[in-house]
Image (cartoon, rainbow, N blue to C red):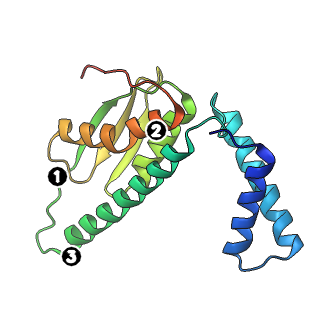
Amino acid sequence: MKISRTILHIVLAVIWCAMHNSFHPATFIVGYLLAWASTSMFRALSQYTPYRMNVWEAIKLFFVFLKEMIVANIQIAFIIISPPMNIRPGLIEYPLDIKNEGAIVLLANMISLTPGTLSVDIAEDRKSIYVHAMVMETPDLLKKKIKDSFERRIQKMLGEEAEEHSS
């Protein structure tokens, strides 16, 4: 689905106004300028433009991320309030199937924003991310969770074909 830049900026500016509960022209102008600046930055960081990505897949990715955030927050809260802090920290090298630099940064940020996990580093060759987990059942289970919840959805959003990566 292709959306013109102007329409996207207007929609984002209206959302900005609604969030601020003010439809004053100055609020709209600030929202429009922020929308223009943020989409321009995204465009500069990625070979994919936000207007060519699959909007439906982006919405699904947002809700999957939201679900993962809620579940991780609940899990971390239980770990913190339980008397024997049941943590099993671990560090893994997570192999990447995505090649786009912007998508790699998006994945790394999604991992870091999910409580209990942290993207420590991205390999120089951009073929892996080093991930620290506060509670790790097994390295393979953590890799599968990241692959299924975030990376494949980012690939679908950007229209990349998933390459099977041997691990």
**Amino acid found under the numbered disc labelled 3:** Ile
Q: Residue furthest left?
A: 84
Q: CA distance from mark 3 to mark 1?
A: 16 Å
**In this rendering, the label closer to the viewer, 2 or 1:** 2
Q: Secondary structure at mark 3?
A: helix
Instruction: Name the residue rendered at 19%, 48% in the picture.
Output: 136
Q: Which mark is residue 22?
A: none
**Dot 2 or dot 1, earlier in sequence:** 1
Answer above or below: position of 33 versus 158: below
State the residue position of label 2.
154
Q: CA distance from mark 2 to mark 1?
A: 28 Å
Q: Position of residue 162 (x, y in %)?
A: 39, 25
State the residue position of label 1.
88
Q: Residues within 10 Å of mark 3 (few under 14, many from 20)?
A: few
Q: Which mark is residue 81?
A: 3
**Amino acid found under the numbered disc labelled 2:** Ile
Instruction: Name the residue rendered at 48%, 44% in the picture.
Output: 57
